[in-house]
Amino acid sequence: MTTNPPIAALSKGQRYSGGTTCLGCVWMANLLDHFAIAVDRHPDRTAIVEGDGREITFSAVQIRAQQLASKWKRKGVGQGDHVLLAMPVNADLYASLAALWSLGATVVLPEPAMGLAGLRHAARTTQPKAFCASGHFALLKFVVPELFKLRLLLPGSARSAPGVAAVHDSDTALISFTSGTTGQAKAIPRSHAFLMAQHDAIAPLLHSDAVERDLVAFPVFTLINLAAGRTTVLPNWKMSNLDRLSPEQLAGWISKQQVTRLLIPPSLCEKLAQCKDTGQLHTVFTGGGPVFPDLVERLLANTGLDVVCVYGSTEAEPIAHLDVRDISEVDQREMAAGKGLLVGFPVSQIKLRIRNDEVQVAGDHVNDGYLDPTHSKANKIKDGTTIWHRTGDVGHLDDEGRLWLLGRLGSDVRTPTGRTFPFAIEIAARQWPGVTNSALMNFEESPALCIEGDAGQLSNWSGLAQELGIAKVIHVRKIPMDKRHNSKVDRVKLAHLLGC
């Protein structure tokens, strides 16, 4: 077995030092150690397939990271420095992350869904020392006022000369942001220990004894794959332009890259359900938005794939998971009758409780605070030594310990039968003839069901809605969805569209 130098420096006692180290004796502090072991085991295995089809091996990613670390160390990047990063999602992005972490730097990732406003907000909030960018993103250094004084780090060419810092569990590895769709985007610091805890929570869900090729639309899962020595195939489309992606294009990329598993949002599952040939594909992991029963039914009927739904949030990923083949006929009937959306059993690494109808979670991979402490007042509850995160989701646990969701706090409406949350109505409505999407809203102080689909069915929908206690149905040509994954109703935009 080839012995490769680890990216991370030795610290806090024994750490990985090459192929001769007994894994049973290794103390692994962070993702860099796991990645170094993956390189040692599979140096010539493809780590990342980029959107243009270029394949990069594990050893090549490591060498690239070492080169960049050496180059940027000479640029003055060091322990604790904040580095704002804006790059296309490719192998260089992940090599850059590894390089900056190995120098002890904190990487600041702006929220992509917020565009330029998100970049400026990230710069103002975190006060970075440098701006790491490539391609057209580098030009922002000269046009965005918040970036003028920052040192510019370009990947470019570099010599390999490893020079690393001691990386401690408590060091902040990442600062990312909430999407800001329901208020100001909050900065979330994540330590190396947090990322490892997240790895430990996600890794069992993705474990496979087979050699998989995963098409990944969520960057965090690419980090998990790099740590596990598993191949990641990146999308050959822009996630911001999902509407332009055809099922044929999706199927073509899956087939060409011999993809065996997908890690994608529900919006892509909608397109997958229309694919005629998915080649060697056998499993889909989906999350980032509600996975409704009608979508699951289409996926199973049209593709026959195994489907696993993963529920989580920006501050806590994952929270629960569900193999859709475990959904019984009774579960289906109860979802259609208004019990909510079944999302499965909480992961073993998390504590979960229901307080005042809200799902609250705690654990090592649950964010326990924000960069701005004032943001924690509304979202965190300290109970003894435990800090609970308020998800803002309304839910309940059944007798088996499975979690059911009903919608967001504050999204409820008043009907003749009492207080009703969106999923109780939307799940039923999505199964009506001609419906492609639905959203329960408060309109002019009374509940209204907004429906996207065949307007010729409007009178039929109105009659069905009356049976559920909803007097008003509004046909909407296109219900606005979130910018991040195009999988959740953007209720703020929809309210503006309705004029309420």
Image: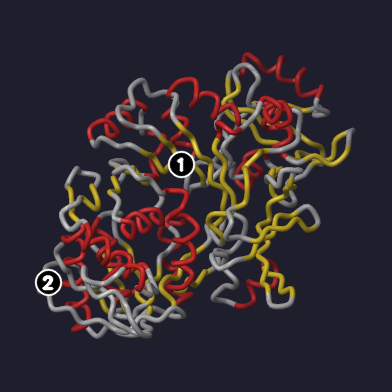
| Amino acid beneath label 1 | Phe
Q: What element carries label 2?
A: loop
Name above or below for residue 409 compared with residue 84: above
Q: What element carries label 1?
A: strand
Which numbered dot is residue 285? 1
Question: Residue 116: horizontal and vertical position, in percent?
Answer: 40, 60
Name above or below for residue 72 compared with residue 270: below
Q: Residue 364: which quarter of the image?
A: bottom right
Could you tell me which quadrant the N terminus lies in? bottom left
Residue at image position (38%, 24%) is 275
Name the residue nearer the viewer: 350 or 256.
350
Could you tell me which quadrant the C terminus lies in? top right
Which numbered dot is residue 158? 2
Name the residue nearer the viewer: 173 or 373.
173
Question: Residue 284: horizontal and vertical position, in percent?
Answer: 43, 37
Residue 92 placement, left or right of 209: left
Residue at image position (46%, 66%) is 176
Residue at image position (56%, 37%) is 291
Name above or below for residue 177 compared with residue 318: below
Name above or below for residue 186 compared with residue 162: above
Classify mark 1: residues with Cα within 10 Å, few (<14), some (14-19) or many (20+).
Answer: many
